Amino acid sequence: MWTGPGRRPLLYVVLVLCFPVIWLYTWDRPMYSRILLSSLPSNAFERPGVSASRLRTAFANAPNTSEFGSMGERIAAYASHIKTLMADTRLSRTSLLNLLERDFPWFWPAAPIFLPWSASATATASAHDTTGLVISVGTGNVVFATHLIRSLRNVLQSTLPIQIAYSGDADLSPDGRDQLLQLGPDIEMLDLSRSFNGSLVGLETAGWGQKPFAMLASRFRKVMLVDADVVFLQNPDRTFETQPGLVETGTLFWHDRAFVKDDRSRRDWLRSLMQEKEPSEMLQRSLFWRANAWQEMESGVVCLDKGRPEVFMSLVYAAWMNTEVVRTAQTWQHVHGDKETYWIAAELSSTPYHFEADYGGAIGVLETVVGGGIQKGHRICTSHIAHTDAKRRPFWFNGSFLFNKASTSLQLADFTHWMTGAEDFPDTPAWDMVHATPEGVMCQYGATALPLNGTKYEQLIDDMRHEARNLGWG
């Protein structure tokens, strides 16, 4: 349409105007970067303990996999600049957006994605201060998501809006989407392929790695990311108001099971990334850092307040770690999927973050071991990991309501007791890793088993079992 006789002069004008920009961007990227940097305000690179010249040098080029750890300084500088923009709505966002586009070309932020620096979010925070659940769902776990949503709505009376995150028809079929949308009001679809460059991110092969992108693409400011096979034992609607660590930092993570593996490679890798950076207080308290626990985080539920610039940029960092090039060269060589990237991104960018103190516990049926050996006494053998709230009450567990979610038998699990993990190895119940089954069943022992029967949880579990049977389970 631009080659008709009457339109050629306009075409020439467009080419003349656009050529310098195209030339700078495609043939002289360092010069383009210098132009972007020169357009930023003088205080854009203010970071305590880090020289502005060092940060300007770091920003001179787009990040690459060799900067996995030092990327944290860039993320922190971004957060500092966003705070400046949020404090003065008259300041232009153009330079910020141009730099973000250069450094994270896979991200296409557009409405209704929540962006903390947008003028509307800054001017009318109350209207945009929304909280919601984001459930990552593929065709293979629609049935688990169905049970989760029915339990939230029918048993726990949750009213939080829900976004179902997926990546195109190949990930979640139209039939699967229709099935989930029919579960009630305030349920909507979130197609990640509309917000990210799929070829750069590698969404089709990302698996669990899609999850940080789902949080990033959500319209919610306060996001609770939930795996499809999660079972809540409390209504989650007021989590952002009632959990002190989340209120303080805008983040809430939960620990995985605490067990030691004779392999220091993960911790050594993190140490190498930190270089001379001092570990945060949260990391110093962790069994991962102090006692070589093999896993630190269980990402079945993740809570983030994206309205805080440091939290938002930390999430961008975690997503970057899960892009195809970075995860192949670095991240997934050392950790399992997305699960450790949230707190590692926060740690490396000096973003305050919070873990619930107890490590993962067990929920299932109490057994008595009569013979000798280290497991003498009581134990719970289960594939379900139990997690607590700040008051050490059961909050959620994973693995759905099935004894083995990978089996086609659809056998319902029984839940009569639970054990909490503790904060340190002398007090932490032990896990029998040697005799773990292929179905993921492990036995926890060495702690007091707390009953569920005869408590308020008994009725909740019965009601959720009823929802499961309505799906044909059991």
Image: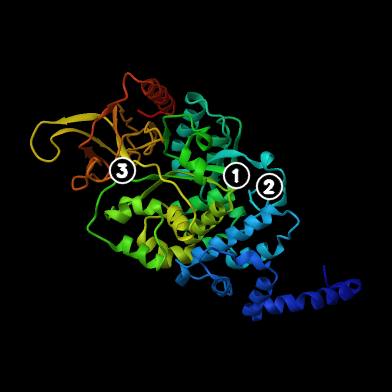
Find numbered disc 3 in the image and state the secondary structure of the residue it sits on: loop
Q: Amino acid at mark 1?
A: Arg
Q: Are marks 2 and 1 in contact (CB under 8 Å)?
A: yes
Q: Position of residue 360 (x, y in %)?
A: 33, 41
Q: Are marks 3 and 1 in contact (CB under 8 Å)?
A: no
Q: Residue furthest left?
A: 372
- Depth-wise, is mark 3 or mark 1 nearer the camera? 3
Q: Are marks 2 and 3 in contact (CB under 8 Å)?
A: no
Q: Nearer the viewer, residue 155 or 412?
A: 155
Residue at position x 62%, y 63% from top? 100
Rounded to the nearest whole Å, what is the CA distance between mark 3 and mark 1?
31 Å
The picture quadrant where one finds residue 174 is top right
Residue at position x 48%, y 51% from top? 352
> Could you tell which of marks 2 and 1 lies nearer the N-terminus?
2
Q: Amino acid at mark 3?
A: Glu
Residue at position x 57%, y 74% from top? 53
Q: Residue furthest front?
A: 49
Q: Is residue 230 visible?
A: yes
Question: Seen in the image, is 326 located left or right of residue 386?
Answer: right
Residue of label 2: 121
Rounded to the nearest whole Å, what is the CA distance between mark 2 and mark 1?
9 Å
Residue of label 3: 423
Q: Residue furthest right?
A: 6
Q: Position of residue 300 (x, y in %)?
A: 42, 43
